[in-house]
Image: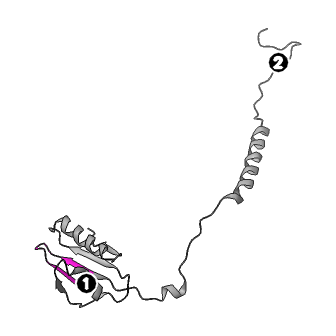
Amino acid sequence: MAGSAPGGRRRRMMSEINVVPYIDVTLVLLIIFMVTAPMIVTGAIDLPRVGQSAQQPAVAIEVLIRKDGSHSVRKREQGAAEQKVTRSELPDAVRRLMEAPGAPVIILAERDVRYDTVVQALNMLQSEGIGRVGLAVRQE
């Protein structure tokens, strides 16, 4: 007879899964993770201190550039008056308005101002030692 085992006994299909190799692999992976977990370097976070947060932020200085090429400066405060200046007087006028060294300077230029004019003002301020200079943008 085809398909019968010698001696007249029929073989049955084995329908169970041997899980021992899976348990072995799982235990090996567990050991690897337990050994390597303490070796992972966590990043240090530099949190602000209470004394630092009590300080008032420095008042920013605004440099306004109009499309006709005129420049003016003012403090970024409610009701601050603009002072018209020439391009060569710009660094000195900004320094006069600074209350503390390192105060931020923000350049505000009209939409139609040539990019070259803005870059020249930015370069002039940075070459005169005014380091914290940024550009204002409008979010739409």
Is residue 11 on the magenta stretch? no
Give the amino acid type for the residue marked by disc 2 in the picture.
Arg
Picture quadrant of residue 49: bottom right
Residue 20: give x, y in percent of width and height. Answer: 79, 39
Residue 39, numbered circle: none
Residue 123: give x, y in percent of width and height. Answer: 27, 70
Against 132, residue 19 (above or below) is above
Out of 97 and 28, give the one closest to the viewer: 97
Against 134, residue 73 (above or below) is below
Judged from the image, the secondary structure of the residue bearing numbered disc 2 is: loop
Residue 10, numbered circle: 2
Query: Left or right: where does residue 46 sit relative to residue 13?
Result: left
Residue 58: give x, y in percent of width and height. Answer: 38, 85
* Quadrant the N terminus occupies: top right
Magenta range is: 62-73
Q: What's the residue at 77%, 25% (across, down)?
A: 13
